[in-house]
Amino acid sequence: MEKRANARRDGRLSRRDFMGAAAAVAAFTMVPRHVLGGAGNTPPSEKLNIAGVGIGGMGKNNVANCADAGANIVALCDVDSKYSAEVFKRYPKARPWTDFRKMVDEQKDIDAVVIATPDHVHAVVAMAAMQRGKHVYVQKPLTRTVWEARMLTEAARKYKVATQMGNQGIPARKSGWSANGSRTARSGTWREVHCWTNRPVCHRGSTGRRIRPLCRKVWTGTCGSVRRRCGRYNPAYLPFNWRAWIDFGAGALGDMGCHVMDAAFWSLKLKYPVSVEASHSWEVKQMWTRFDNKETYPSAEVVHYQFPARGTCRR
């Protein structure tokens, strides 16, 4: 009895509870079929309540996919009200937020959080959600650093929540690539796999104009260095170009690596590399004058990953 009471602490009526109550008053009540569930109908008590954080870009599609799957969109959070206005308007029943911290603290009906913010706050938002028992779906790249990824992994185990990283198109491509790759792999020894992309495509210069109004403190998140440079905000950062800045994004490797390298990892059953070697292009301000740009990622780079022969890595 205590267990059942705890399960209903959120105030929602489970299918079992409702069926029991319906049986008791069946002689007096006509119950719509969509409430009871059954073929093609999911009762409201079994629908997930979804919150979206970062909904102007890829998050717009992620939230729409959840809604199409039958979930309830109960909260939406974005610091750029202009860029995300269309999404707020599409879900009028969802409670609007600017600060995700207030959202996860104050809105108690959220089951899961879909996160599609710029990279620098992926881990921060996901950790805040998991610590409060919320399941999370985080757009790629999962985090900006290896340490952040390890912290989220430990948090998922500790708080026993469901997690997934969004990698556009991979579920569909993976099955075909893996099957073909596995057949090819059995036919001989694989020594090299080459992956490449046309990225970056982001603008890397400053326009000298201030960015449109938004909640800057929340958007910068943990980037103290950016706060010290807050007077330099300009449209070069948003809505997509933040990927080029070291403070906010993960560069072309973080943007596209999970797409173009994922198939090789799954097909060849790779795990941890034993070494990584990288080189990149220099930035040029004027002829014969190169400089090391410490604010944005390079325009071009080559990264070599060395993996052990399969079966030799004991990690």
Image (cartoon, grey):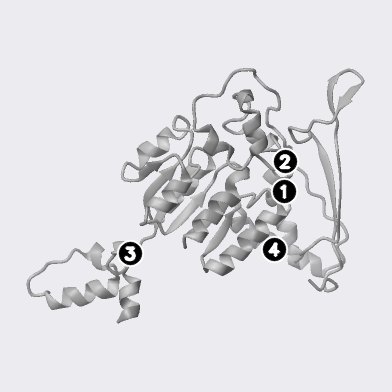
**Precedes in sequence: disc 4 or disc 3:** 3
Relative to residue 42, is residue 140 depicted above or below?
above
**Precedes in sequence: disc 2 or disc 4:** 4
Residue drawn 44% across the image and 39% down it: 98
Residue 49, x across and y down, in percent:
38, 56
Residue drawn 47% across the image and 53% down it: 113
Q: Disc 1 marks which residue?
A: 257
Q: Disc 2 marks which residue?
A: 252
Residue drawn 80% across the image and 30% down it: 293
**Precedes in sequence: disc 4 or disc 1:** 4
The answer for how far apart the CA atoms under marks 2 and 4 are is 24 Å
**Precedes in sequence: disc 1 or disc 2:** 2
**Precedes in sequence: disc 1 or disc 3:** 3
The answer for how far apart the CA atoms under marks 3 and 2 are is 43 Å
In the picture, the quarter occupied by the N terminus is bottom left
> Are discs 4 and 3 less than 8 Å apart at CB?
no
Q: Disc 4 marks which residue?
A: 178
Residue drawn 51% across the image and 60% down it: 131
Name the front one of labels 4 and 1.
Answer: 1
Name the residue nearer the viewer: 48 or 107: 107
The answer for how far apart the CA atoms under marks 4 and 1 are is 17 Å
Name the front one of labels 2 and 4.
Answer: 2
Residue 285, x across and y down, in percent:
83, 20
Q: Amino acid at mark 1?
A: Gly
Among all residues in the image, which is located at the extreme right? 288
Query: What SS does tag 4 mark?
Result: helix
